């Protein structure tokens, strides 16, 4: 009996618990993230964020005010870290270079997280989106990318859609595909300057809602995560942004923003870093 009692006391002591001993306080990941922020950001209290505001409903200008899911999400991330957001308009093709040069702290602009882009920056993934084909109403399902052969295809400059259309062009043989560079691809389809357009699903879906003479053709193609871009030599900032995103997912802020901008089908709760391909 005495041996059993001794064994019990030993196990209790080994467990590190006893009456009157305070329990360990839970880790405050957000506090750790704030403490690890680069000194320049901590001292200013500002997260300089770049976007190309031409991708409604993700990022656009409403008068002089920036608006869209990307804007709301970045401002919520900054808020979790005790920061405010200072926005800068940057052309899409210059965003990653400006991140790498620390001219901006972060980019967010409906940018797919792709392997080639990961060579320049690290991405914190926040939404899944595929490519949609937009056509004139009545054209129906043209059969995905091969169905673009023989058509004029509008795509925004310096986006992956130009690459996709150009790659498909090489496989079209005698049915010539013409790439039409455009800042408003869906409008070009509506106005007859193009036969089809390529764009992110959330943007294409909103265009179709606004322009009654165009429609989506077939299902989404190749769903890929969007990413917030951060310089590779600022890993603490990348980790802090990821931690803030996790906090938003946990407290419901993330889902509320997706519902507000009607993109709930793109929910991505992994918060992965460089999770694209």
Image (spheres, rainbow, N blue to C red):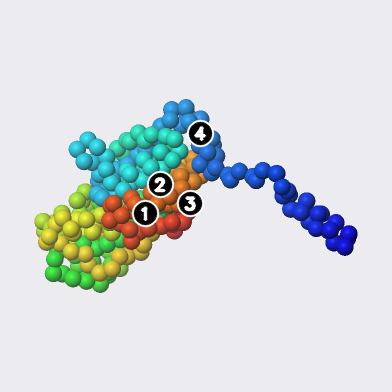
Percent of width and height locating residue 199: 26, 57
Which of the 4 quarters of the picture holds residue 147?
Answer: bottom left
Tell me which label, 3 or 4, sits earlier in the chain: 4
Residue under pointer 3: 273
Measured in 3D between alpha carbons, the distance from the residue under mark 2 to the one under mark 4, in whole angstroms, is 17 Å
Measured in 3D between alpha carbons, the distance from the residue under mark 1 to the one under mark 4, in whole angstroms, is 29 Å
Q: Identify which residue, 176 or 15, lies in the foreground.
A: 15
SS for dot 2: strand
Percent of width and height locating residue 256: 34, 52
Disc 3 residue crowd, few under 14, some 14–19, many 20+, Cα 10 Å: some
Tell me which label, 3 or 1, sits earlier in the chain: 1
Q: Which residue does the image show at 13% across and 66% down from the upper left? A: 137
Tell me if 85 is positioned left or right of 63 in this view. right
Tell me if 124 is positioned left or right of 65 in this view. right
Disc 1 residue crowd, few under 14, some 14–19, many 20+, Cα 10 Å: some
Measured in 3D between alpha carbons, the distance from the residue under mark 3 to the one under mark 4, in whole angstroms, is 19 Å
Q: Which residue does the image show at 33% across and 36% down from the upper left? A: 87
SS for dot 4: loop
The answer to whether residue 87 shows anywhere in this view is yes
Position of the N terminus by quadrant? bottom right
Residue under pointer 4: 38
The answer to whether residue 164 shows anywhere in this view is no
Measured in 3D between alpha carbons, the distance from the residue under mark 3 to the one under mark 1, in whole angstroms, is 20 Å
Q: Which residue does the image show at 42% across and 45% down from the upper left? A: 229
Residue under pointer 1: 255
Residue under pointer 2: 228
Tell me which label, 1 or 4, sits earlier in the chain: 4
Disc 2 residue crowd, few under 14, some 14–19, many 20+, Cα 10 Å: many
């Amino acid at each position: 009996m005495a041996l059993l009692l001794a064994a019990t006391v030993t196990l209790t002591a080994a467990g590190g618990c006893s009456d009157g001993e305070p329990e360990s306080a839970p880790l405050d990941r957000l506090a750790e993230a704030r403490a690890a922020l680069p000194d320049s950001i901590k001292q200013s209290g500002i997260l300089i964020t770049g976007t190309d505001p031409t991708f409604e409903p993700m990022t656009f200008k409403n008068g002089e005010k920036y608006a869209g899911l990307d804007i709301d999400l970045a401002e919520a991330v900054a808020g979790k870290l005790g920061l405010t957001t200072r926005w800068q308009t940057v052309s899409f093709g210059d965003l990653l270079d400006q991140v790498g040069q620390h001219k901006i702290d972060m980019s967010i602009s409906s940018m797919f997280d792709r392997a080639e882009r990961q060579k320049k920056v690290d991405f914190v993934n926040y939404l899944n989106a595929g490519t949609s084909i937009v056509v004139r109403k009545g054209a129906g399902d043209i059969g995905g990318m091969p169905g673009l052969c023989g058509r004029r295809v509008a795509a925004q400059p310096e986006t992956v859609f130009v690459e996709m259309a150009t790659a498909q062009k090489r496989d079209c043989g005698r049915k010539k595909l013409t790439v039409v560079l455009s800042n408003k691809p869906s409008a070009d389809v509506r106005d007859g300057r193009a036969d089809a357009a390529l764009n992110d699903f959330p943007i294409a879906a909103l265009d179709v809602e606004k322009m009654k003479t165009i429609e989506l053709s077939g299902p989404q193609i190749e769903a890929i995560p969007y990413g917030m871009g951060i310089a590779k030599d600022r890993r603490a900032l990348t980790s802090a942004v990821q931690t803030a995103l996790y906090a938003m997912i946990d407290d419901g802020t993330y889902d509320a923003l997706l519902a507000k901008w009607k993109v709930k089908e793109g929910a991505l709760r992994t918060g992965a870093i460089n999770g694209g391909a």
